[in-house]
Image (cartoon, rainbow, N blue to C red):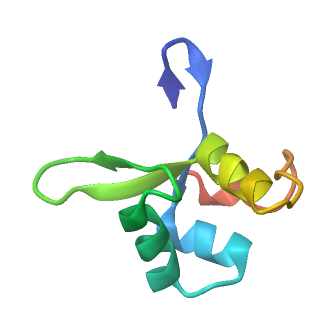
Amino acid sequence: MQVNGTQTRMLRVKAVANVLDVHISTVYRLVESGQLGSVRIGFGKGAIRIPADSLNTYLVGLGVAPLAEGDGYEGAIA
């Protein structure tokens, strides 16, 4: 996905849950609390997507190394 001329990977909630090895409801709670940045796509409630940069920011905040290309989340791009 192109955003402002840059490539931004958009991850599904399930893919982020798999990366973090948590339940998807945990990812929804992180999004609701503002700890994990997200965007809504579509009409009505819309679909939640988590930019890979937001996931990496969250991981760095936890003191964990950010994900690099090839860490297993490429197939999860919306």
> Which residue is at the far top?
5
Does residue 10 appear to the left or right of 49 in the view shown?
A: right
Q: Nearer the viewer, residue 64 or 77?
A: 64
> Which residue is at the far left?
44
Query: How many numbered discs, if any?
Result: 0
Q: Nearer the viewer, residue 2 or 56?
A: 56
The residue at 65%/41% (across/down) is 53
Q: Nearer the viewer, residue 69 or 38?
A: 38
Does residue 52 appear to the left or right of 49 in the view shown?
A: right
Q: Position of residue 22 (x, y in %)?
A: 63, 84
Q: Position of residue 33 (x, y in %)?
A: 41, 65
The residue at 73%/54% (across/down) is 61
Does residue 2 appear to the left or right of 28 in the view shown?
A: right
The residue at 67%/77% (across/down) is 18
Task: Decide: is 4 above or below 75.
Answer: above
Q: Position of residue 15 (x, y in %)?
A: 60, 68
The residue at 55%/87% (across/down) is 23
> Which residue is at the far bottom?
23
Q: Position of residue 43 (x, y in %)?
A: 13, 49
Does residue 37 appear to the left or right of 7 in the view shown?
A: left
Task: Decide: is 69 above or below 46.
Answer: above
